Amino acid sequence: MPRAPGTISSVAASGTEQIRGRSMGFLARTSVGELKGVGPKSVEALEEMGISTVLDLICHYPRRYLDRTQQASLANMVPGEQAVVLASVRRTSSRPLRGRRRLVEVDVHDGTGWLRCTFFNQPWRERQLSEGTQVALFGKLELYQGRRQMTNPVVDLVGDRTRRIVAVYPSSEKAGVATWEIASWVDEALRRAGPLADPLPSEWRSRLGLADRTSAFRGIHVPESLREKEVARRRLAFDELLRLQIVLVMRKRLLEYRSEGISHRLCRAGAPDGSGGSDSSLLDELITELPFKLTQAQLTAIEEVCADMASEHPMHRLLQGDVGAGKTVVALAGLLVAVQSGHQGLLMAPTEVLAEQHYFGLRSLLAKMTVQDTGRIEARRPVRVELLTNRTSRGRRDRLSEQLRTGEVDILVGTHALLGQDVRLASAGLVVIDEQHRFGVEQRAVLRDQGRIGTGKTPDLLVMTATPIPRTAAMTVYGDLDVSVLGELPQGRVPVTTKWVREPSSETAVWEKVRSEIAAGRRAYIVCPLIEGSDRMEARAVVAEHKRLQEGPLAGVALALLHGQMPSREKEAVMTAFRDGDVGALVTTTVIEVGVDIAEATVMVVEDAGRFGLAQLHQLRGRVGRSGLPSWCYLLDWSASEDGVRRLEALERTTDGFALAEVDLEIRGEGTVLGTRQQGRNDLRLASLRKDQELVLAARRVAEDLVGRDSTLHAHPLLADELRLFIDEEDEAFLFKS
């Protein structure tokens, strides 16, 4: 929502932009109580709906439109048909039912026929739908005892409006505000406002074929045709996206140019294969000694990371890749560049299991590598990697803290424990955050600030995610980051065979497959149902399932139990036994969702799979198929919801995480995707990241053009003022007062 009246910053008067018409700032300073017909009671009711200013009111967009030229008539409707009917209430009655419930019956007429509407346990309908009320009813036509009827239809009080296109607004029965009242107040607001000032330069409006601001607001509220409504929506949706993109571009520019970075002297951009340098570097050694060949996508990402790290500005990059695409190797390449340049690296993971895996993996890959000892010019020492988690002992933590300050530790891997005040590095060169969506922006900033303490310079930042999202969503969620994409999997990977098991009778075959794979020396994961509300509830559920499997379908198989409530030492012992093959199957929760990498794991069984999100299911599937061995993922669910069915069918259909991301966006909408953005962004009320991809790209181009030529928007005071209305005070301070 726009900021409340009284907290709006004023527009700089020195800009070159010609301002004609009412600005958004003016409308945000004008109370709805100043409008004709909006009395004290209406003001109070509107405030309950979050509407206190004229700007709030005209940004309260219709939820749908009734085309009176295309409306259904009762005389022509057939039973079973769903439609919108515009009619007048002729009679309303009510009677009690059992259990203190009440039935309201309303008879309406549209000039062609009669319809009875029945409302169960909605007693307020008797007061709302009095005789003579004009209503829009949406529902399915039924025949009951020979009478045309709708049961619990959607009701909108539209008033006696004669326009061809009638806007229907989100209204509030609780507050006592009807859609026709909102429509009349919006009409009054637009009439009183007159021409609206347009913050978008006319050359961009012309180039993009966008309506002007005044036409857009009239077209969205009082369109003469549905075509006019779409033209208006396109312009206002673009405005929403432009505000987002300008803030992101401004933030990116400030991060790049306000901070003094480290120019890593041994990072040779464009030569990740070892060409173009004199002495062998740690990066050359890594690529030479890897037991596999890097993909072209990995080589390209390493080039991009190296180019950023060679720059005098701090790197601020997102590495996005599908499950198993090899992001960790790219991150390690950057860490080694930092170490080679005489600095240190931090790698933060969201769970102890993942942090420990990174630690063991890095130690194995770096076992033979040495780096120059800063204390002795000609001496070399092994590259030192250490681990810090919440279960690290106090004594061990104190020793690590001292060794970090003296530069004896080259790479520190850990969990949230890295955010502790005792983590101070001699010279942090690179901060890597794995599964970045698990961490907030504040934690990201804390980690960079800690790295700045030793040298006063801002370390480079690389954040990674294995949860692919569509490009346009990435430009919005991660718009202040440069993006590298690993769009291919390493050679030799065999696609995981995915099967949705829909009937209990088919479950036996799943457990037989688990048995046969374990007998062949493989491993299996069995993930128990997701239970919302409590980690302890999940722990109890997985313990019960472990016992059931041990005594039933998997009797005699070496099973182990793993969940988040177990002590850390116990979890570590279980994972070690699983890696070593002493345990054949792990009965677990989603604690193994990300990063666990055991090549011998070939079977994943997810119980009640429809309760999990699509990205989470894709992550779980990614725990198998991490070698050249054939692998299987079984999704057990025989009572999935409608959305659950769509998710499970999509998982069966493809293993492409980016394709699944598009499906996920379609199912869930952008609200959940945008929930990962930092706070302070205005809501997308009209824009859709899925439907308006062209507008997202256009908004980014305009933002880069405007901010590139005028980083403080000095020449565009109207646009600067509008941004202040729709972003939070922290962003305003950062962007406009820095």
Image (spheres, grey):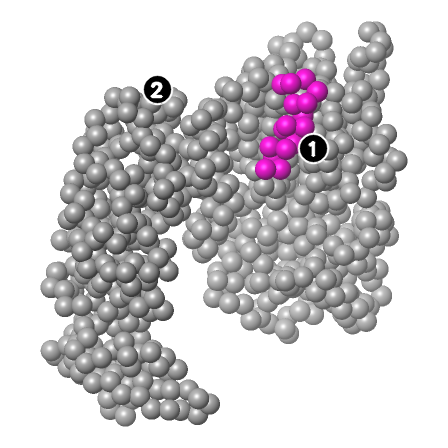
Place of residue 50 in the rendered image (x, y in percent of width and height, measured from the top left): 37, 55
Residue 227 in the figure: left or right of residue 636 = left
Residue sitting at the far right = 395
**Amino acid type of disc 1?**
Leu
In the image, residue 443 lies in the stretch drawn in magenta = yes
Q: CA distance from mark 2 to mark 1?
A: 36 Å
Place of residue 148 in the rendered image (x, y in percent of width and height, measured from the top left): 24, 84
Q: Report the residue at 51% width, 20% height from top.
A: 258
Most common secondary structure along the magenta stretch = helix
Mark 1 neighbour class, 10 Å CA radius: few under 14, some 14 to 19, many 20 or more: many
Q: Report the residue at 84% width, 60% height from top.
A: 558
Q: Is residue 152 above or below residue 299?
A: below
Residue under label 1, please give it: 347
**Amino acid type of disc 2?**
Arg
- Between marks 2 and 1 in the image, the one whose residue lies nearer the viewer: 2
At mark 1, the secondary structure is strand
Q: Report the residue at 50% width, 55% height from top.
A: 650
Residue 694 location, quadrant: top left
Label at residue 179: none
Boundaries of the magenta span:
442-457
Residue 122 location, quadrant: bottom left
Residue 555 location, quadrant: bottom right
Label at residue 709: 2
